[in-house]
Image: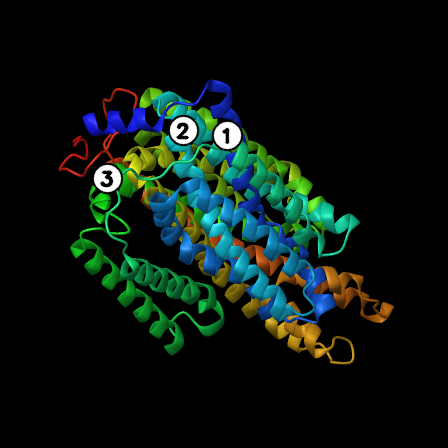
Amino acid sequence: MSSLTTSRHRTGKPQFRRRYLALLVICVAELLVVLDNTVVNVALPSMGLQLRADISGLQWVVDAYTLTFAGLLLAFGHLGDRYGRKKVMVVGLAGIAVMSIGGAVAADLGQVVAARAAMGVCAAAVFPATLALIINIFTDAKERALAIAAWTAMAGFAIAIGPTAGGFLLEHFSWHSVFWINVPVALLVLVAALACVPESKAEHVGKYDPVGIALSLAGITVLVWAIIEAPHNGWLSAISIGAYAAGSAAVVAFVWWELRTPSPVLDLNLFRNRRFSLPALAIAVAYFSMFGFLFMITQYFQGVMELTPLQFGVHSLPFAISIAIGAPLATIIAQRIGTTAVIVFGLVVMSIGMFIAGQVKVETPYLGPVLVSMILMGLGLAIVQGPATESIMSSVTLDEAGAGSAVNDTTREVGGTLGVAVLGSIVASIYTAQVGPKIDAIPDAIMEPYQKAFARETVVSVIEIVKAPTNPIFASQKADLVYAMKAASLEGFQLASFVTVGAAMACALTVALFLPWRRPEGDGVLLAWRGSENGDTIS
């Protein structure tokens, strides 16, 4: 413990006001990164019309960001530990501003995708630094827990508020505005970070590990790419299986190398500690559930309820508010009764919310099961991620803060990507099987081939079908088709909800059985927990 105490004193303890001002700046930086990951979704239809892009191309506007972001989190977390977390974060913020300009002035889809990929690289520099900086600024256990609660609440809130922000921008401006808005915000946060956020980096660093960084980048990127493309290529196609094998081989090589190199990018012994590995699993499952839920609720609001982007955003606000309220409360409660009970309860709450969401029908009113499911999903996510993140970050030393934060962030991204890919694939398979024959039977004179292709892929196409002028003779057939499309999508949602409930409950049982229920004893500073038979040994 003496080395940690010394490290704590070396880091210093900024004045109360300065600490919380730094927290505010860090949370706004986090907000910018997470909004970048969600707000663009609302602009996709407008972008597609102007750039004449197909569905696959538009999906890569989103996925290019996710791919580079997830792949580089661990690498930038390590670089922040080595060279300074504030320095890496500031470079990332500057990059977001520059690359956002590139996206805003892009003349074709390829340029937009390239800009989004570059923005993902820059965001990967910012995100792990935010959490690593927080645990170095807030070394008192209670203050640190509250600061992490604010960080987790902001992450969930930003994900949920994205549709509202995007809807507002599109209501008043073109799709270019989702890029332009980043520029002044990123520059303001950059200046504020330089003025208000103290620098921190690892006191002791070993030799640079380029092999570990390269293997982690290759493994995570290839696996995330395989997950993203699996619904299109086929989960068991030759391309998908080849990508799984290549990504898995890179991950295995990464593990082999990190266990043998004297200065690893990531200390894999952390995963032997159940207070690190099981909360990371809980976060991955929680984000699997949440991203899948948001994917489905987006289609529900726009395709089934036929809401505008702004209306959709407003209707999703209860989800965001639940997260903002639940995260700090859950972290405070976890300080009193222990992390395990709170995480298990949160996963059960998410399961209940997702089960209710799966029972929604075309005629179901918003003020009822839809609203209740959103509130329960938001609360469940908040209850899980605050205490789980605090447990993860309390399991690493101050020198490993960036790497620990990167693992925490990578589990979120991989879990969320899996949620959209797996649950989206389930919904699409049921929807296409039921709607495809009905659409194929429509004469091309009434519905053009490209319109049929769009209608087969997503229920959001209902908006264009309803708007399209129709001969009164075919009005009833059109109404029947629209209803069938809505009903088919909700049937897919139901099966996807059962999969999500099963995953969340299985994770809850695993955490309940294997994560220690007794709170570790400590003196209020960061503890270097190391794995032992009962998960409670202090080094």
Percent coordinates x, y for residue 275 in the rendering: 26, 36
Residue to which mark 3 is pinned = 274
Query: In the depicted view, which residue is nearer to us: 219 or 519?
Result: 219
Q: Nearer the viewer, mark 3 or mark 2?
A: 2
Question: Residue 297 at what x, y percent from top left?
Answer: 58, 49
Circle 2 packing at 10 Å, graded few (<14), some (14-19), many (20+), is many
Q: Which residue is mark 1?
A: 22
Query: Residue 136 bears which disc, if any?
Result: none
Q: Is residue 446 above or below residue 416?
A: below
Viewer-proximal residue among 131 and 19 = 19
Residue at the image point whose x is 54% and y is 32% from the top = 195
Q: Give the residue at the far right of this rendering.
A: 472
Which badge, 3 or 2, comes first in the chain's sequence?
2
Q: Are marks 2 and 1 in contact (CB under 8 Å)?
A: yes
Which image quarter is the N terminus in? top left
Q: Residue type at mark 1?
A: Ala
The amino acid on which the numbered mark 2 sits, given as a three-letter code, is Ile
State the SS at label 1.
helix
Report the residue at 51% width, 20% height from top. 17
Q: Which residue is mark 2?
A: 137
